[in-house]
Image (cartoon, coloured by chain):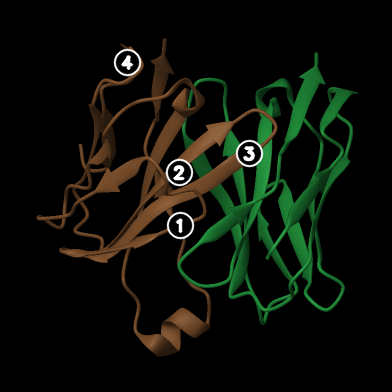
C-alpha cells in the first residue's frame, strides 16, 4: 500500500525566506506526483504536476523536484510572501487513485 | 462559470439519517472522485467513477453509496449516517486520456470547494 509522508507538518518563517517542503512515498510505481495548495475552508488547487519521467517542474516562484528511485519530492518556494500561507499537500498518482500526504501547514509572517 | 460545484456546503444531520452530497462538473470530465478529509488521516478516496454507470471503491468505501447516471453528476449517499462520518468531503474530476498520454502522467484532478458534514 502506498504511503506518503510530508515533513515538516508545520512551518513558520519570516517573509522573504526561501523554503523547502519535503514529501516521501513508499512505492515508486507512480504516473506522477502533484503538489496542491489548500487554503482554510477551501478546496485544493493544483500547483505543479511532475510526470514520472520528469525530474522537476517550475511555476513562478515554485519549483518541484522528483526523485522516483528514492521516493522523494521537494517543493521549493522562493522569496516567500504572506500570501503563500496555506497547507501544501503532495499526492502520488499510481492509477485512478491519488494518495495524499498529511500536508505541511505554512505560515509566512510579514 | 464552468467548474466543479458541491452542495450543500455545510450539513448537520443526526445518526441514522440518510444524507446525499451532490457534485456537479461542467467540463464533461470522464472521471469523478469522492474524498474525505480528516485530521490525522489526510485525504482518503471513498469512491470514484470512470464514466457514467461505472463506479469503483476507493480506500474507505464502507457506509457510502454512489451513482453516476449522468457524466456531470456524481452524488454520494450516506445511507445511515454515523458520527465517524463527520468529515469534510471533496469531490474531484479528471478528464480521460488516451493510454499514451495517461502513461505520460499529464493529468490532474480538479477539486470542488468541499462539504462540511457533521453527524450528531
- Element class at badge 4: strand
Quickly name the residue at label 4.
B11
The disc at residue B58 is 1
**Pointer 3 or 2: first along the chain:** 2
Nearer the observer: mark 1 or 2; the answer is 1
Q: Viewer-nearest of labels 1 and 3?
A: 1
Of pointers 1 and 3, the one earlier in the residue sequence:
3
User: What is the chain letter for disc 3?
Assistant: B
> Is the C terminus of chain A in the top left, top right, bottom left or bottom right quadrant?
top right
The chain holding disc 1 is B
In the rendered structure, the colour chosen for chain B is: brown
Q: Would you place residue A91 above or below residue A69 in this image?
A: above
Q: Where is residue A52 in the image (x, y as percent from the top left)?
A: 65, 77
Whether pointer 3 and pointer 4 mark residues with C-beta atoms closer than 8 Å, the reply is no
Q: Nearer the viewer, residue A38 or A64?
A: A38
Q: Dot 3, how many residues are within 10 Å of its Cα: few (below 14), some (14-19), or many (20+)?
A: some
| Residue B62, image x, y percentages | 42, 46
Residue at 16 percent across and 51 percent down: it is B72
Residue B66, x across and y down, in percent: 25, 48
Quadrant in the picture for residue A57: bottom right
Proximity of marks 1 and 3: CB atoms separated by less than 8 Å: no
Q: Do labels 3 and 2 share a chain?
A: yes
Would you call the spot at circle 2 few (<14 residues within 10 Å), some (14-19), or many (20 or more)? many
For the colour green, the matching chain is A
Among numbered discs 3 and 4, the one appearing first in the sequence: 4
Is circle 1 on the same chain as circle 4? yes
- Tag 2's secondary structure? strand
Q: In this figure, which residue is indicated by the disc labeled 3?
A: B42
State whether discs 1 and 3 lie on one chain: yes
Instruction: Please tell me whether mark 3 sits on a helix, a strand or a loop.
Output: strand
In contact (CB < 8 Å): disc 1 and disc 2: yes
Amino acid at each position: 500500500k502506498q504511503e506518503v509522508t510530508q515533513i515538516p507538518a508545520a512551518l513558520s518563517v519570516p517573509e522573504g525566506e526561501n523554503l523547502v517542503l519535503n514529501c516521501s512515498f513508499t512505492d515508486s510505481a507512480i504516473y506522477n506526483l502533484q503538489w496542491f495548495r489548500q487554503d482554510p475552508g477551501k478546496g485544493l488547487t493544483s500547483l505543479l504536476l511532475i510526470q514520472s519521467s520528469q525530474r522537476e517542474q517550475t511555476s513562478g516562484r515554485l519549483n518541484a523536484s522528483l526523485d522516483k528511485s528514492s521516493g522523494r519530492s521537494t517543493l521549493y518556494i522562493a522569496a516567500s510572501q504572506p500570501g503563500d500561507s496555506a497547507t501544501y499537500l503532495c499526492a502520488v498518482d499510481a492509477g485512478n487513485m491519488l494518495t495524499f500526504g498529511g500536508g505541511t501547514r505554512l505560515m509566512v509572517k510579514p | 462559470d464552468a467548474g466543479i460545484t458541491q452542495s450543500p456546503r455545510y450539513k448537520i444531520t443526526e445518526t441514522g439519517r440518510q444524507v446525499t452530497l451532490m457534485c456537479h462538473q461542467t467540463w464533461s470530465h470522464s472521471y469523478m472522485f469522492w474524498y474525505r478529509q480528516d485530521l490525522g488521516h489526510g485525504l482518503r478516496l471513498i469512491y470514484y467513477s470512470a464514466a457514467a454507470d461505472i463506479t469503483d471503491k476507493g480506500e474507505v468505501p464502507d457506509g457510502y453509496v454512489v451513482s453516476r447516471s449522468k457524466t456531470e453528476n456524481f452524488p454520494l449517499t450516506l445511507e445511515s449516517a454515523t458520527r465517524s462520518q463527520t468529515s469534510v468531503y471533496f469531490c474531484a474530476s479528471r478528464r480521460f486520456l488516451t493510454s499514451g498520454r495517461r502513461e505520460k502522467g499529464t493529468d490532474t484532478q480538479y477539486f470542488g470547494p468541499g462539504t462540511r458534514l457533521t453527524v450528531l
